[in-house]
Image (cartoon, rainbow, N blue to C red):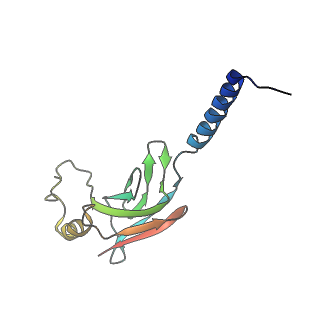
Amino acid sequence: MFRISAHVLRTGLAVLACGVCSWGCSRGPDVVEVGGTLTRNGKPLPNMAVTFHPEKGRTSVAVTDANGHFDLVYTRDQKGALRGKHKVHVHYAPQSTSYTSDNSGAPADLKDIEAKYGKLESTKLEVQIDGPKKDLNLAVD
């Protein structure tokens, strides 16, 4: 009869456990590329920070360009957002440093947008990300 020593058995189980743990950990978060356009009444909104907050995990952010276009960034080295449901908040992100966080520096026509969508706690804007999306239209009123 073949017998396995306790030491060999423990070593084999430890190697197996390390292999399973490293396989599961190496996958990383399920991030997909996400981009689109932020609009108001069908017109692009430039210089707006767009933040996607997933139900669990790290947020993704972007700033709209002159055409209202954005590409979300998950980390410095990875573009996109986690798959799943996200609350989205937007606020004015000017090039100048005279802006204050209480939105007093935002142009008058953007203050109502910031009041409605500018805080995570109050925004009603939600998006479901199921896969890569480069043409997402975020419309605010």
- Rendered-image quadrant of the N terminus: top right
In this view, the residue farthest toward the front is 1
Determine which quarter of the picture holds residue 5: top right
Residue 22 is left or right of residue 62, and the answer is right
> Measuring 44% from the left and 45% from the top, which residue is drawn there?
75
User: x and y percent of residue 50 in the render?
Assistant: 35, 59
Residue 39 is left or right of residue 84, and the answer is left
Against 94, residue 77 (above or below) is above
> Measuring 24% from the left and 66% from the top, which residue is drawn there?
122
Against 112, residue 17 (above or below) is above
User: x and y percent of residue 133 in the render?
Assistant: 52, 64
> Measuring 37% from the left and 77% from the top, which residue is drawn there?
42
Give the camera-side residue of 24 and 80. 24
User: x and y percent of residue 43 in the render?
Assistant: 35, 73
- Rendered-image quadrant of the C terminus: bottom left
Give the camera-side residue of 4 and 114. 4
